[in-house]
Amino acid sequence: MSNIEKEIAELAHPELPNHNDEECLALAEKLMSQMTLKEKFGQLFQLAPSNANIEGLQWQETNDFNDLIKQGLVGSILSVADIKEIYQLQKTAVTQSRLGIPLFFGYDIIHGCHTGFPINLAMACSFEPKLIERVAQVMAFEASHNGITMTFSPMVDLVRDPRWGRVMESNGEDPYLNKLMGQAYVKGFQQDSLSSYNSIASCCKHFAAYGMVEAGREYNTVDMSERELRQYHLPGYKACLDAGASSIMTSFNIYNGVPATANKFLLRDILRNEWGYSGFTISDYTSSYEMLDHKTSANEREVAKQSILAGLDHEMVSTTYIKYLEELITANEVNEALINEACLRMLTFKYKSGLFDNPYKNIYANVDQYYLTNNSRQLAKEAAIKSIVLLKNDNQTLPLKPTTKIALVGPLGKTNELVGAWGGLVKNESCVTVYEGLVNQFGQANVQFAEGCNINDNDSSLFEQAYEVAKNSDVIVLAIGESQTMSGEAKSRAYLNIPGVQNELARKLKSLGKPIIAIVFAGRPLELEWYQNNVDAILFAWFLGSETGDSIADIVSGKANPSAKLAMSFPYTVGQVPVYYNQYKTGRPSATGKYSEFRSCYIDVPNYPLYSFGYGLSYSKFEYSNLQLSKKQISGKEKLVAKVTLTNTSSIDGVEVAQLYIECKSFSVVRPVRELKAIQKISLKAHESKELTFEIGANDLAYYNIDMEFTPEDTDYIIYIGGCSNANISDNFSYNS
């Protein structure tokens, strides 16, 4: 055992005091009174050491990072997860810098630390915030025992363009669902106590509206009206901050022509003045440097000036603050009070996190004992089952009987590369393959495998082998889709097809005339029209993490019943993008959504998506009936109560996600055709009925009107309730102020 290992083994983890906000602020102010100006600058800089686990551009500075820490010029560390290195860096800060101010350690724990959970877009399909909160608690437990103080999560960018690789990290296209899921992540990560040994701080991102990059191209331009920003995009961030998120990260994009990292309207006018947010702001990775490429800053000195004036507290990797802030203060171009404000926020956070009470609070010996426990894997399996969307199931193809002879064909059938992008410290080796899962359920003798082809090349030499294997089966299970490296940051795609020759393989197997079940893996919605028309069943599996194979096998065998609903619409073709359920009403609508001359439509595909938001099948069958509204008119703060009967008309127990939408009949500005306002996830026994009750009020009906007032106006509304965004059971009511 090395000396470092011995020191780590001797670390204690006593109960820490839980300082309230006032105490933390007072302690931070007292410490600041002892700090030099340079030491204050240091608290505003996040360093990525040369061996940091970075997905992206590497830190190019030549300064020795240990020397910077000793000088007190580093406030936090990015993407270091080796427990011995974390200990050494923290020990340097605490014992060798003048004031011994501890570092905090940030890492992207997005949908798993060591236990791999489904990608975030997949988990959003659960429509179950409580599940998300439990998942975040497990991620926090593993991360907090791996030296990590803060995660850069959740991402609550609203998304409508599946070409963007980072849709996989989102909660989908709907602002209401986005709010619910964002809050659940924050609560799960932080658990109402940053000083706990089991929690980590949450930094929500990317502020603001990064999900709307033009053409779905990473790091690209965002341009929208303030009404669009406030109505659809800001609510997700606001919900996270209301839930107590410790920090918020600026986005790479511009808003109203100004980079978000130096956007005063976003960072001061909205964040501080309107919302009264007291946590700290942090740039995205080198996003302050990138103002030079935006051409809104002529040099790094201007970058530092514009950013601090706009309200950026903590600079990730870029070094303009520690280089130029002193010069800017001396030249009277920046008021020292701004530095004090930012530094105070950083120190207050560290006191809240318990780092001053125990700088080594997140450092443990024998860390493997905290990872991939039976409980965490069981939760990962539950989350995976609740994330798999059944898109098609003709003639009750699924579930399969236990004696079914299965030909598992496809490049994703035996691979364990199933974590998905932004997988934290999750290893592929932890993932159960589809083959292993099916063998566990159906037995070795009943499952034969053939790869058929690779994911993303034009080699069809393995087709014949797959064809021969499939000939001897009762059913063909196709494991196809994207590789896990085809989505995530900097993984935008111009096409949404299943890549390579996988479609050609599927067509060849179709000629056998056997039932085909397509299991599709991807980090985004894909074009699936051929599969909808030609295969018998489709399971959209996204990337499910550690328990992929067993969760899929449970669905295929009927041990589990699908319940997930799409959090993002699937287009017929990329030419429809963006296509989403809550589109604005148009002046020349197509009555059917199909071609009609001199109407808003295509001549070759429908307006609507192949699979809409909220869509997802079950082995059970559900029926909605007897919708009743408590009143035909509400006013002021009155609540409208809507009741509906939900019946499981099948002989299989199941779970349904009931969704309530509204439509405004007329308003001072154009509103969407429908807006989601409430969800309920209901378990029903076979042939059981339950009466569901929903409440909505003025705030649910409100919208930014022509005068930018958030109001329901005095007008008429329609309520729709059902199992998808195209629900057709409805009734009318009016609102009167």
Image: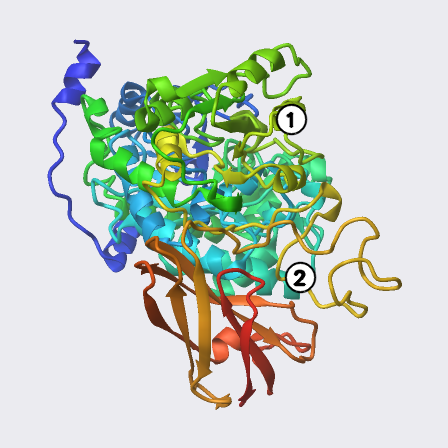
In the displayed image of the protein, which residue is found farthest to the right? 598
Residue at image coords 21%, 44%? 196
From the viewer's perspective, tell me whether residue 93 is left or right of residue 48: left
Query: Measured from the top left, where is residue 421 in percent x and y?
Result: 49, 31
Q: Answer with the quarter of the image where residue 493 lies.
A: top right
Of residues 225 and 181, the one drawn nearer to the viewer in this rendering: 181
Of residues 542 and 639, the one drawn nearer to the viewer in this rendering: 542
From the viewer's perspective, tell me whether residue 572 is left or right of residue 373: right
Camera sees residue 334: yes
Three-letter code for the amino acid on which mark 2 is drawn:
Gln
**How busy is the neighbourhood of tag 1: few (under 14 within 10 Å), some, or many (20 plus)?**
few
Which label was assigned to residue 129?
A: none
Q: Answer with the quarter of the image where residue 67 lies.
A: top left
Task: Check the image and report above or below for 580 versus 461.
Answer: below
Residue at image coords 60%, 74%? 663
Of residues 576 and 214, the one drawn nearer to the viewer in this rendering: 576
Q: Name the front one of labels 2 and 1.
A: 1
Colour logic: rainbow
Three-letter code for the amino acid on which mark 1 is drawn:
Ser
Query: Measured from the top left, where is residue 138 in percent x and y?
Result: 28, 40
**How many numbered callouts?**
2
Task: Check the image and report above or below for 160 versus 37.
Answer: below
Query: Measured from the top left, where is residue 446 in percent x and y?
Result: 38, 21
CA gap between label 2 and label 1 equals 39 Å
Which label was assigned to residue 583?
A: 2
What residue is disc 1 on? 511
Of residues 613 and 115, the one drawn nearer to the viewer in this rendering: 613
Mark 2 or mark 1, earlier in chain: 1
From the viewer's perspective, tell me whether residue 475 is left or right of residue 1: right
Query: Measured from the top left, where is residue 645 in percent x and y?
Result: 40, 73
Camera sees residue 393: no
